[in-house]
Amino acid sequence: MKLTLHVWRQSGPTAPGRFETYVAPDVNEHMSFLEMLDVVNERLTAEGKEPFAFEHDCREGICGSCGMVINGRPHGKTGLTATCQLHMRHFSDGEELWIEPYRAKAFPVIRDLIVDRSAFDRIIQAGGYISARTGSAPEANAILVPKPAADWAMDAAQCIGCGACVAACPNASAMLFLSAKVSHLGLLPQGQPERYERVQRMLEQHDAEGFGNCTNHGACEAVCPKGISLDFIAKLNRDMLASALRAPVAQE
């Protein structure tokens, strides 16, 4: 099939950006979206032109680094799918594709389709961990975990931190990401000692990074490649209210 690609080009976070148009004349329907981009870049390199930059790593829908906006939708038209798992059979011959990076103040453009998502790392550093020393791995049944809690924690732990929720949200909120990272620890016994301190610290960092507030549009859930539920945001709000009734976290 033949496709027309309008790709966002930008040399840095403060540089002006623009769309440039490229033609992909021989696209195989069995290619993944990233393979198609590789082929276009190989052609640009052969012609002595500068290839466009995009990020990827695992190409298995695990790492989340492949995120980009395709025709206005993070990760493209197929639900519950990261960009690296999107295949060209979902597109039609002659179709035009507009490909751009995530748009959010907290995700500055590094180059072309690559954005700096280190704000997520700093949110995790603020409290997305268990600091208690646990020693060697305990016997599997030493701490009993109710199955509903274990299942819900596993659902939250599926978040790959791709940032699609931020890109889709009209407020550029990262509440879906934050709620998943808070919940997958807070639902388990090991996460209880720091449960409310974790909520306070991570929420404060979320706001400090420049992410917006959640106003329940639901766009984040709609584009999440792992299907993270809005229910986790509701749980985050409950934990946030509970933490407000406790002593404030000491500032270091």
Image: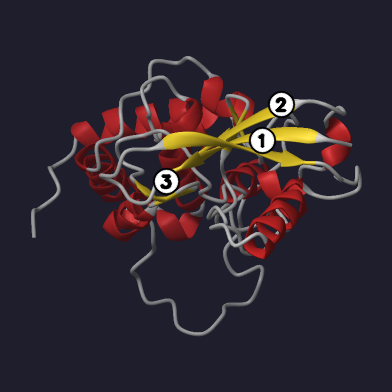
**Mark closer to the observer (1, 3):** 1
Residue 130, position as x, y percentages in the image: 38, 64
**Mark closer to the observer (2, 3):** 2
**Local SS, label 3:** helix
Residue 228 visible to an observer of this rendering? no
Residue for badge 1: 5
Most extreme residue toward the left is 251
Query: Given contact means CB atoms under 8 Å apart, are the residues at marks 1 and 2 in contact?
Result: yes
Q: Classify the position of the C terminus by image quarter.
A: bottom left
Alpha carbon separation for disc pair 1 and 2: 6 Å
Residue 163, position as x, y percentages in the image: 49, 42
Residue 158 visible to an observer of this rendering? yes
Alpha carbon separation for disc pair 2 and 3: 39 Å
Q: Looking at the picture, tell me which residue is in the foreground, 92 or 20.
A: 20
Residue for badge 2: 96
Hey, what amino acid is under mark 1? Leu
Label 3 environment density (alpha carbons within 10 Å; few <14, some 14–19, many ≥20): many
Label 2 environment density (alpha carbons within 10 Å; few <14, some 14–19, many ≥20): some
Q: Classify the position of the N terminus by image quarter.
A: top right
Hey, what amino acid is under mark 3? Val
Residue for badge 3: 182
x 46%, y 47%: residue: 112
